[in-house]
Image (tube, rainbow, N blue to C red):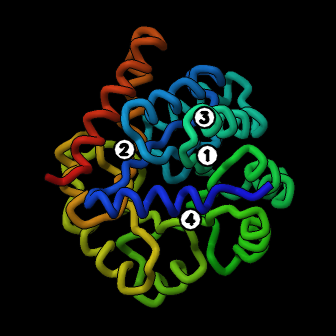
Amino acid sequence: MSGNIALLDKTLAAAKAEDRAALVAYLPAGFPTVEGGIAAVKAAFEGGADIVEVGLPHSDPVLDGPVIQTADDIALRGGVKIADVMRTVREAHRATGKPVLVMTYWNPIDRYGVERFTAELAEAGGAGCILPDLPVQESELWREHGAKHGLATVFVVAPSSKDERLATITAAGSGFVYAASLMGVTGTRASVGQQAADLVARTRKTTELPVCVGLGVSNAEQAREVAGFADGVIVGSAFVKRLLDAPTLDEGLAEVRRLAADLARGVRRS
């Protein structure tokens, strides 16, 4: 069964045709429970997200700040497994018909088996994978199996990436390019800043792929700022914090829907 990279491409192109940025939400699988995590992904879509990244919880998430680390810890203590990540992708995609990716560090895939992981993700209807710590020069095995199953390979670029390095990364990727707006870990910020706009401009010189910006966006005003120069706006910690702070799951899901609706207005630029 082929993956859904075509659906991802179509979704990003449709947002561009509407003269807006796509809204990409991030939520970890298994948080606050496996069932709760599935409901949260659906709630983000219901609120207005175009694409959702499902995080594979990791015990040493080097890119993630305290909010997502807390959620990952809850999911891991709850016993979340890769099978639960695949189930989250499957049920969210089937319920909404929208593109769902997995965001994961390389170690769990390496231990699980690349062929097994890519085959199961494609079977679940996954659109691809974001691999923040997989060096491009070591990615051939992943890209070979990902392409075989119709999965996007999304690499992360940072403000520290030199132009030559950007060209190497974007030539190897598919789906979109994940531009980290600043150096450091995930988390909400008071300002997204000029660094992100400069990185997007430099990245665009190397590729036709859409460039989506993450790290730091937490409200409609920031989403509107980023939508002014990027093809997609990625929001993670702000969604996770709504769930963490809510007294009940139902209230948390309502907050996720509200935030998604607010951000969806923001990415419309005007």
Q: Secondary structure at mark 3?
A: helix
Q: 189 or 99: nearer the eye?
A: 99
Badges 4 and 3: C-beta atoms under 8 Å apart? no
* Type of amino acid at the residue the image marks with label 1: Asp
Structural distance between the alpha carbons of marks 4 and 3: 20 Å
Q: Nearer the viewer, mark 3 or mark 1?
A: 3
Residue 86's spot in the image, x, y percent?
Answer: 72, 40
Q: Nearer the viewer, mark 4 or mark 1?
A: 4
Residue 240 in view (yes/no): no
Label for residue 187? 2
Q: 19 or 153: nearer the eye?
A: 19
* Type of amino acid at the residue the image marks with label 2: Gly
Q: Secondary structure at mark 4?
A: strand
Residue 142's spot in the image, x, y percent?
Answer: 74, 68
Which quadrant would residue 14 be assigned to in this image? bottom left
- Mark positioned earlier in the residue sequence (4 or 2): 4
Q: Which residue is mark 4?
A: 154
Task: Residue at 31%, 49% (x, y): give it.
Answer: 216
Which quadrant would residue 8 be assigned to in this image? bottom right
Q: Nearer the viewer, mark 4 or mark 2?
A: 4
Q: Is residue 204 above or below residue 76?
A: below
Q: Which residue is mark 3?
A: 92
* Type of amino acid at the residue the image marks with label 4: Val
Q: Secondary structure at mark 2?
A: loop
Residue 65's spot in the image, x, y percent?
Answer: 44, 43
Q: Which residue is mark 1?
A: 60
